[in-house]
Amino acid sequence: MPSFSSLVIEPDPNHPRIARLRLNRPERLNAIDEAMPREIRAAVEWANEQPAIHVIVVDGAGKGFCGGYDLSLFGQGRIDHPCQQERTPWDPMADYAFMKRNTEDFMSLWRSPKPTIAMVHGHAVAGGSDIALSCDLLVMAEDARIGYMPTRVWGCPTTAMWTFRLGPTRAKQMMFTGDTIDGRTAADWGLANLAVPAAGLEAATLELAGRIAGVPSSHLAMHKMVVNQVLLSMGLEQTQSLATIFDGITRHNPEGLWFRRYAQAEGFKAAVAWRDSGRAIPEGDVARAAIAELERRLAPPG
């Protein structure tokens, strides 16, 4: 069995045709670190190499599915990173290369010849929603939440799956507001295949996975290729490239740099609380002035 730092994968002990891929950073709400995207791809590749496995179920350990990128690393920390460049002028292609690779790693779930099912409890938000929506099917607890709050500031969903999964009108609502929706709403909108009481989430997901697992792998792969080809013909890959470029801009333009400096000065919890409150985000020259003041506060004494 392969060994990873951010997740585990193994055949389900009671359903050997089903692989269980579990995001396993519960102490950080399964937040995405530098290793997780690469390890998701490696785990998916491993599952596809196992002839007995027919379907992959993805879930999260602990209180939720995935809380997005680890802001204690990527937001609050004062580090120079391709996605958080402290040097100026920033290099958009360095950011793009890093985030495009992460996007392709998440999308290994979508490209996998074997079907993938996200089983969501708690929260699947920000980058965690990218992981969930890269899966073919989505089963949610009725009280689970999914959304992409960083569309308010400091993010653009690089997988761009919201439009392809929800349609333009609902996708715009989610992107413009940064709101989250619960499992019941996700099912009503057609984003989730099923929404069930939390106590029955695993049983409902495994029932669906078991039904799929009885189909020959070759048939599953062919049917998946046909459906995926429709999305490719609609411009999925081109849209993801644009979204990934914009994601980098949102983190390095005046509004994005203000959010980073505010997180560094006040902590990421305070920055996220401002972002999600509906309070106006400083923009343009107001953001630039706020950045200058925050940088004065952050400067070492002397």
Image (cartoon, rainbow, N blue to C red):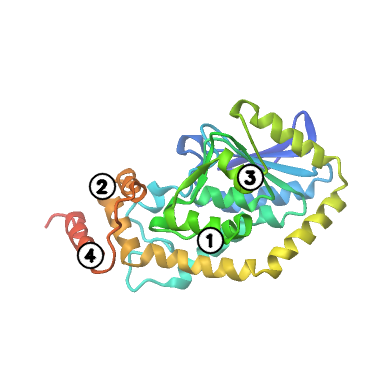
Query: Pointers 3 and 4 in contact (CB under 8 A)?
Result: no
Residue position for label 1: 158
Within-10-Å neighbours for mark 4: few <14, some 14–19, many 20+: few
Residue position for label 3: 192
Q: How far apart are marks 2 and 1 (CA)?
A: 27 Å
Instruction: Say whether disc 2 or disc 3 marks the residue closer to the N-terminus.
Output: 3
Q: Which amino acid does label 1 sit on?
A: Thr
Q: SS of the residue at dot 3?
A: loop
Residue position for label 2: 266
Q: Which of marks 3 and 1 is in front?
A: 3
Q: Which residue ends up furthest to the top in the rendered image?
A: 199
Q: In this view, does 33 lie above or below 89?
A: above
Q: SS of the residue at dot 4?
A: helix
Q: How far apart are marks 4 and 2 (CA)?
A: 18 Å
Instruction: Say whether disc 4 or disc 1 marks the residue closer to the N-terminus.
Output: 1
Taking the image as shown, residue 212 lies to the left or right of residue 301, namely right
Taking the image as shown, residue 250 lies to the left or right of residue 227, namely left
